[in-house]
Image (spheres, rainbow, N blue to C red):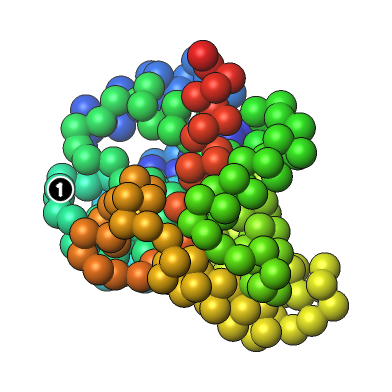
Amino acid sequence: MANTIKILLSEQNERIIESMRDYFSHKSVEIYFCAKNGKTLLDCIRKYTPDVVMCDVFMSEFDAISVKEKASVLENPPELFLIASSYDNDDIIKRTLAAGFNYYFIKPYSPETVYDRILSIFKPGNLNVNTSVIDMYISRLLHKFEMPSHLKGYNYVHMAIKLVIAHPGYINNVTKKLYPEIAREFNTTASRVERSIRTAVETAWNRASMEVKEMYFSYYALNYIKPSNSEFIAYVSDIVRNTITFEKMS
């Protein structure tokens, strides 16, 4: 990511567009706007190659999940995908986050909140944190989840979380980017990485106490759902990133 963040907002509300344009004119941000239409949004992603895309869940032609899937195979896919929606619905929120969206904003939202959230989930290099500190936080959390360290998947999960903290866009490209990079590091195959991570996540989920599950994965725990590989990695990455951000602000 360059020093200037490029944001593409799919929005038709003129009041929101004006407030976003005015706020971001004073930041190191280039912001572009396009109609609330999935096909138009995809064309604009190709044209502007933004770092961040923010759109509604439901759009004409392509919905948000379809746009994200199509954009993920582009040569320069967006690093972050954000949802801005009037729908405060648990099922919709779960489905979009499970699809790899980085954050779900409920309208109305403020430009300040959007900017703060973008900064908080971009690369940890912006946080100026030693990687050993990140390693420590990841290890502590995996220990809380009682993930056995002797499993191959433990090391794969640890590296996956670290990579997603450094490159949030990786969570949108688990099969094509995240698993292959881990496989290269450990001299194995992407399919073996995927299977080993699945085993490690399932083992941790079965061993962790309900208290820990409810603390960190409340939706999944209360609905008796095991998080997928990407959901587990995304959630733990966010926990570590937000913990570091909070401690630096304290």
* SS at badge 1: loop
In front: 66, or 44?
A: 66
Residue 28 in the image, given as x and y percentages of width and height: 58, 23
Residue 181 in the image, given as x and y percentages of width and height: 75, 68
The reply to whether residue 132 is in sight is: yes
Q: Quadrant of residue 58?
A: bottom left
| Dot 1 amino acid type | Asp
In front: 198, or 245?
A: 198
Left or right: residue 202 compared with residue 34: right
In front: 84, or 133?
A: 133
Q: Which residue is mark 1?
A: 88
Q: Quadrant of the N terminus?
A: top right
Residue 202 in the image, given as x and y percentages of width and height: 47, 74
- Tell me the crowding category of disc 1: few under 14, some 14 to 19, or many 20 or more residues within 10 angstroms, Cα based: few
Left or right: residue 234 compared with residue 74: left
Q: Is residue 114 above or below residue 62?
A: above
x 49%, y 45%: residue: 238
x 39%, y 31%: residue: 114
